[in-house]
Amino acid sequence: MPDFDLADAPVRELNAMLHALPPDTNETRWSIRNPGGKHAIACGLDRAITVEIAGHVGYYCGGMNKHATILIDGNAGVGLGENMMSGEVRITGDASQAAGATGCGGLLVIGGNASARCGISMKGIDIVVMGSIGPMSAFMAQAGNLVVLGDAGEALGDSIYEARLFVRGSVASLGADCIEKTMSAEDEAALAGVLAKADLAHVPTKSFKLYGSARKLYHFHVDNADAY
Amino acid sequence: MNDQPHRDPPDERQPTHRTLPRYSATFDPHTIAEIQRAAATGIYDIRGGGAKRKLPHFDDLLFLGASISRYPLEGYREKCGTNVVLGSRFAKKPIELKIPVTIAGMSFGALSGQAKEALGRGASAAGTSTTTGDGGMTPEEREHSSLLVYQYLPSRYGMNPDDLRKADAIEIVIGQGAKPGGGGMLLGQKISPRVAKMRTLPEGIDQRSACRHPDWTGPDDLEIKIEELREITDWQKPIYVKVGASRPYYDTALAVKSGADVVVLDGMQGGTAATQEVFIENVGLPILAAIRPAVQALQDLGLHRKVQLIVSGGIRSGADVAKALALGADVVSIGTAALIALGDNDPALEAEYARLGTTAGAYDDWHEGRDPAGITTQDPVLAARLDPVKAGRRLANYLAVLTLEAQTIARACGKSHVHNLEPEDLVALTVEAAAMAGVPLAGTNWIPGRS
């Protein structure tokens, strides 16, 4: 297993090595030590490899990930797994703002809490937060599933499109055009599927409430002027 | 006898000395119509294009030309270079344009697929780049653009690492001249199934793009964001930062501090696919007022001509190109003029414009998707009217004229490269333009605010 120490070499060198891996690489499991909160670690990966990072990462770790599994034992800065396309990013600790922002696919699992704007503009990613999420989460969320085992902060799902937000705890407030919805069998199956992928199949789906778009802001209308 | 003087009875057919109807300068007919429209509909006016009001502009500047103290170059023989390299600061693969004119970002969604293809064909034939927009990169525009700049916008519609790696440069859009501080807008008529899929949105909704980037705030974060994009693309691509002209000195300095290779500065005459009229006409600076502060920021940082400056907003002719370069820009960018070259607002379509309640030359309802020229539409029947090969050729012709005109002026000023034009070659016709451009009022040594 390749072992890379970020105390000895820059992030550029690590990312260049990871980007240069051929599709049929045998080096499928990487160990990264001393990340030291550095930014852009393991971003832009495009191979089905596993990257284990021992320690805290800075901004945009795992950004735009495709295929790779990135396992972080620590906390993360802003934009963890931003714009992920596929693969997995899992972190044991907390994530700062905009975790999973604009993610198009794949799975992001946050063992601790996530700060503000978790899942902002998400476009198909599945995000599971074991703890709670901060304010303005899932702002303009377009598609995908945000599953929160704890509580949600203020203005959840403001201006939301078609993403599904499953929250087990309390919601401080809902944003414009976001409402609680009845969970259909399809919604429940989707939730169960995401929980299973996150190794949380034991968590009962019935313990969640579903939030999504009221779809009242989909067309401009003067009577909605106070919501714009 | 009646000795009163004779007086004819009033003749109602004769003109009387009545006051002519007088329109108010404040409540002019357009204003009154807008109040009436607002009262009837309850919604602000949305349109395409840039500011239509009269603004201080390049027309208010003149070149001095060569004379006894300056040697001109022979107009048809001596070389006058026009090439420019963008991204030499940090990118491993800077791009070189043959001409100092590029095509501004315009989305597939705002424009038809045929129009995007035509822009790519025309720009490629002229040796310059074209730019994606708020809707992702289409295979067609990548195929037909030899140099393609991929925009990284707040909405991140269609953003993905594969297209990022396919791009020749990346443009982080903070804002645009038509609406500094505003996000994109694409109304339901233009959210076709393909557009909706590319943006991961329901079909037919009125789509409002975010105005703030979702995962960074402020220049310190932007620096880290640029670092991430460079890491993802292995430091190969030039990274531009585009801002609407509002605080050009500070925005340029902050973009440079954040690590930009290129700064793109868009004045309020720069077009939009759809924005509130009140926003277009009342927010931002005309490009004339924005170039010198941006250049000053680059000079103060010792990076003028090292970090390249692209300016846009109301560029129409080679004279405008030459004036923008003389004020310190490296490249100009065109959007509205490029669409006109493709066939927008063609007088031959007058009957159809009339049916839309407008006239050729004034058509700006680009958001409605009913463009008879087939450019600002997603209607397949209308879009099919635009022949991408012929329209691309018209754009290439127009780009050639812009370049030839700029060279003509540069040679007359004795310059062997268009980048050798300088503010010293210019004077202003108005006090306002003199102050904004930082050049003397014609016939004087007076630069308002400086001397």
Image (cartoon, rainbow, N blue to C red):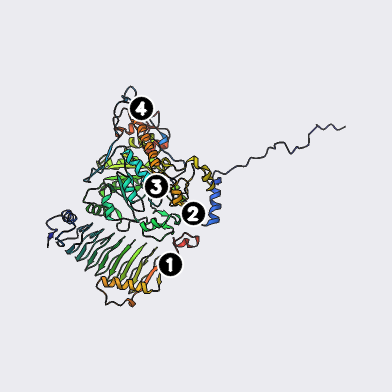
Q: Kindly report the distance in space between the C-alpha atoms of the residues bearing marks 1 and 2.
A: 24 Å
The residue closer to the viewer here, B209 or B175, is B209
Q: Are marks 3 and 4 on the same chain?
A: yes
Label 1 and label 3: CA atoms lie apart by 36 Å
Nearest-to-viewer mark from 1 and 2: 1
- The residue that mark 1 highlights is A214
Query: Could you tell me which secondary element the residue under label 3 belongs to?
Result: helix
Q: Badge 2 is on which residue? A: B44
Q: Which residue is mark 4?
A: B65
Frontmost residue, B309 versus B198: B198
Instruction: Out of B405 and B168, give the one closest to the viewer.
Output: B168
Q: Which residue is mark 3?
A: B114
Amino acid carrying label 2: it is Tyr
What secondary structure is found at the residue carrying circle 4?
loop
Give residue A1's position: percent from left, percent from top. 12, 63
Disc on the earlier residue, 3 or 2: 2
Q: Give left or right: position of B207 versus B5.
A: left
Question: Answer yes or no: do the residues labelled 4 and 2 have beta carbons within 8 Å?
Answer: no
Q: Earlier in the sequence, mark 3 or mark 4?
A: 4
N-terminal-most mark, 4 or 2: 2
Question: Where is the N terminus of chain B found, in terms of image quarters?
Answer: top right
- Which chain does the numbered disc 1 sit on? A
Which of the two discs, 4 and 1, sits closer to the camera?
1
